[in-house]
Amino acid sequence: MVGFGGKQAWLAVRGTAAVPVLEALGLRDLGEVPWREGVDLAYLTDDRVAVTPPLVGARDTRWVVAAGRYLLRPDTTVDVVDLSARLHTEVQFFATHRVTELHRWQRAVDGDLVRAFGYVGQTGEVTSWHGDPDPAERDAGLPAVFDEGSTVLVSESDVRKVANAWSIDPTTLAGRPAPGPIHVGAAD
């Protein structure tokens, strides 16, 4: 497998397969490709998403990971609540871009938003806060309660820590045996 994570956005979807995730995202399935080619497409194009086969992650649960700059585009709306309702499972969204220090994560289960956090380090602004931080988020430095007096400082490594606790840190995939090829989806 090939790892990824920096300057990227990805979804982790519990207990499903690549094709249903592509369909739920409204992407055209372009078929299977080797891992290196799929991850390269996720980084080098704005209209492709690489979707892994199910991978074992947190809580000994299988997760499908969908990654691509397409998910970072301002005109792309990733609605984890809707995706989790339609797929009848848990859906997580992660984004990190170290240039602007944009860091986000969201978690929805069966159509209910459990947690959302967004931060832009360039301005020091917390752009979203829904729900209470769990232990992984507290370990990443978030306060238990957010108000105007709260200080928040989050980095790319914190996004990976939360992803690892909730599902999968995609930077850890490098060098592990691949359970199958990556599917590539295209926006029309």
Image: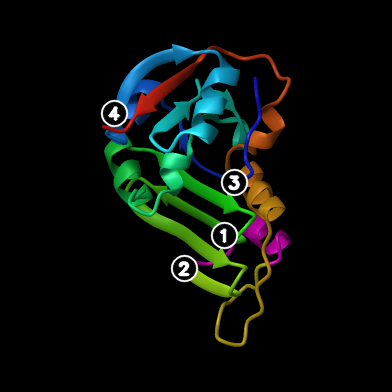
> Tag on residue 128?
2
Q: Quadrant of residue 133?
A: bottom right
Give the mark nearest the N terminus, 2 or 1.
1
Can residue 101 be seen from the camera position used here? yes
Give the mark nearest the N terminus, 3 or 1.
3
Q: Label 1 amino acid?
A: Leu
Q: Is residue 138 magenta?
A: yes
Give the mark nearest the N terminus, 4 or 3.
3
Please state which of residues 55 and 127 is positioned toward the viewer in this rendering.
127
Q: Label 2 amino acid?
A: Ser
CA gap between label 1 and label 4 equals 27 Å
Which residue reaches farthest front? Answer: 44
CA gap between label 4 and label 3 equals 25 Å
CA gap between label 2 and label 4 equals 27 Å
* Residue under label 3: 7
Residue plotted at (67% across, 27% down): 173
Pointers 4 and 3 in contact (CB under 8 A)? no
Crowding near pointer 1: few (<14 within 10 Å), some, many (20+)?
many
Rendered view: 142 above or below 42 = below
The colour mode here is: rainbow
Q: Is residue 79 magenta?
A: no
Residue plotted at (59% across, 61% down): 100
